[in-house]
Image (cartoon, grey):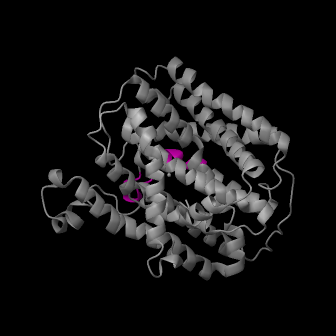
């Protein structure tokens, strides 16, 4: 599933452009953005070699082990990484809006989100797709674009840029909400304790229930709002995590996450990651995984609840671990952080090009993924850094 994996920095300008307001409290958020951007790259590279989703290029016929391990890796990522991206992106939205006002905030979002979205959807992606499938297309580029390119129905948000599109939509909705409620006094930013474990668990349970209900009508991998390339079966989580990010900023929850809470949800996250394997095997996924994707099946209900709890547990765990152990930056992160957004935008053609270069190398799929992974990360961030040297791109990227 391309956009659930892409299902996937500064994959979002609001997130990656932000800078810590206090060095001791927000450095870890920059590092989380880099981590998630790299995870998106590895996720899509895994799809290339495990065949566990739709992607521009899938190689070979993976066996049961490659498919199983690849599916496990991608399912765990899908459970939380785009939701966490939205949460940390939303975390900076209220402050940015308060400083700039509605018009300047909208203009900034259109520049930092709208321009990359349009450039990728209408320039980079069509050229990339044409070069990749030139033999099958069998015509010139100018006949392919726009006559054939838009026949699939997707107008904008192609490939991984669906996520930038979602953040732009959510930002516009936030502006509208602030304008509609502007007659009310803005609530002051008041630090409050991090929600209790019970409250977080009830939130996850509710999120799982809503996800199950949505997928009764819109099963995973089978329902996409084609014009905008949006996989709506995942949007209960995306909306909820964006709203949580808005609330967390006002209440300073990320900085106030208690040590005990972080450790507890880290243990839960490890258990939930391991639980995916028996859940899928007991549900018969080896023969048919469709019951997990939606509909009136116990597997769909179990998966929706597992996904919601995994989202919450892994989100809290990543925030806890990065705040505790990676709340600092050096030369490496000093290079990675400003180039993360550009790396996210350009990573699809980069990793496909690398995969094509080594396509004739005979290696086990997972070993090939492991060996190619560092080159994919370095090439994506390196090319992103070069792109950012082009005049005027610093205003966008």
Magenta stretch: residue 36 in it?
A: no
Q: Nearer the viewer, residue 278 or 28?
A: 28
Residue 232 percent coordinates (x, y): 48, 49
**Residue 96: quadrant of the picture:** bottom right
Residue range of the region highlighted in magenta in the rendering: 225-237
* Residue 284 sits above or below residue 87 on the image: above
* Residue 5 sits above or below residue 302 on the image: below
Is residue 191 at least partly visible in the picture? yes
**Residue 125: quadrant of the picture:** bottom left
The residue under the point 47% across, 75% down is 389
Magenta stretch: residue 236 in it?
A: yes
Q: Nearer the viewer, residue 178 or 137?
A: 137
Q: Nearer the viewer, residue 48 or 253?
A: 48
What secondary structure characterizes most of the magenta part? helix
The residue under the point 76% across, 42% down is 200
Residue 156 percent coordinates (x, y): 38, 63
Residue 199 percent coordinates (x, y): 79, 42
The residue under the point 55% across, 73% down is 109
Asked whether, in this view, residue 172 is left or right of residue 129, the answer is right
Badge count: 0
Residue 375 percent coordinates (x, y): 44, 50
Asked whether, in this view, residue 285 is left or right of residue 86, the answer is left
**Residue 213: quadrant of the picture:** top right
The residue under the point 48% across, 45% down is 42
Quarter placement of the N terminus: top left
Is residue 221 at least partly visible in the picture? no
């Amino acid at each position: 599933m391309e956009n659930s994996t892409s299902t996937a920095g500064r994959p979002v300008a609001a997130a990656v452009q932000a800078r810590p307001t206090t060095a001791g409290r927000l450095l870890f958020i920059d590092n989380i953005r880099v981590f998630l951007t790299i995870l998106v790259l590895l996720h899509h590279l895994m799809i290339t070699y495990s065949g566990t989703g739709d992607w521009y290029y899938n190689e070979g016929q993976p066996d049961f082990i490659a498919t199983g391990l690849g599916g496990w890796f991608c399912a765990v990522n899908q459970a939380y990484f785009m939701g966490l991206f939205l949460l940390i992106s939303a975390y900076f939205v209220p402050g940015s809006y308060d400083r700039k006002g509605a018009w300047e905030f909208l203009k900034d979002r259109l520049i930092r989100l709208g321009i990359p979205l349009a450039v990728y959807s209408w320039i980079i992606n069509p050229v990339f797709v044409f070069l990749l499938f030139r033999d099958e297309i069998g015509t010139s580029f100018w006949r392919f674009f726009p006559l054939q390119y838009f026949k699939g129905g997707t107008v904008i948000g192609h490939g991984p840029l669906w996520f930038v599109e979602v953040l732009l939509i959510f930002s516009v909705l936030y502006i509208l909400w602030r304008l509609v409620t502007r007659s009310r006094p803005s609530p002051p930013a008041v630090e409050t304790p991090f929600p209790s474990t019970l409250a977080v668990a009830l939130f996850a349970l509710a999120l799982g229930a809503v996800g199950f209900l949505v997928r009764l009508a819109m099963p995973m991998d089978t329902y996409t709002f084609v014009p905008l390339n949006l996989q709506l079966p995942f949007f209960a989580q995306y909306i909820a995590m964006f709203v949580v990010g808005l609330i967390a900023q006002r209440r300073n929850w990320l900085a106030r996450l208690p040590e005990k809470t972080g450790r507890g949800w880290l243990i839960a996250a490890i258990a939930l990651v391991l639980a995916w394997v028996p859940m899928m095997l007991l549900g018969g996924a080896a023969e048919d995984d469709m019951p997990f994707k939606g509909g009136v099946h116990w597997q769909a209900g179990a998966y929706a609840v597992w996904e919601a709890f995994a989202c919450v547990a892994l989100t809290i765990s990543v925030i806890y671990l990065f705040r505790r152990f990676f709340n600092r930056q050096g030369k490496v992160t000093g290079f990675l952080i400003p180039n993360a957004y550009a790396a996210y935008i350009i990573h699809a053609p980069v990793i496909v090009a690398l995969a094509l270069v080594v396509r004739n190398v005979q290696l086990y799929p997972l070993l090939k993924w492991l060996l190619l992974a560092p080159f994919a990360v370095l090439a994506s961030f390196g090319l992103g850094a070069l792109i950012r040297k082009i005049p005027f791109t610093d205003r966008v990227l």
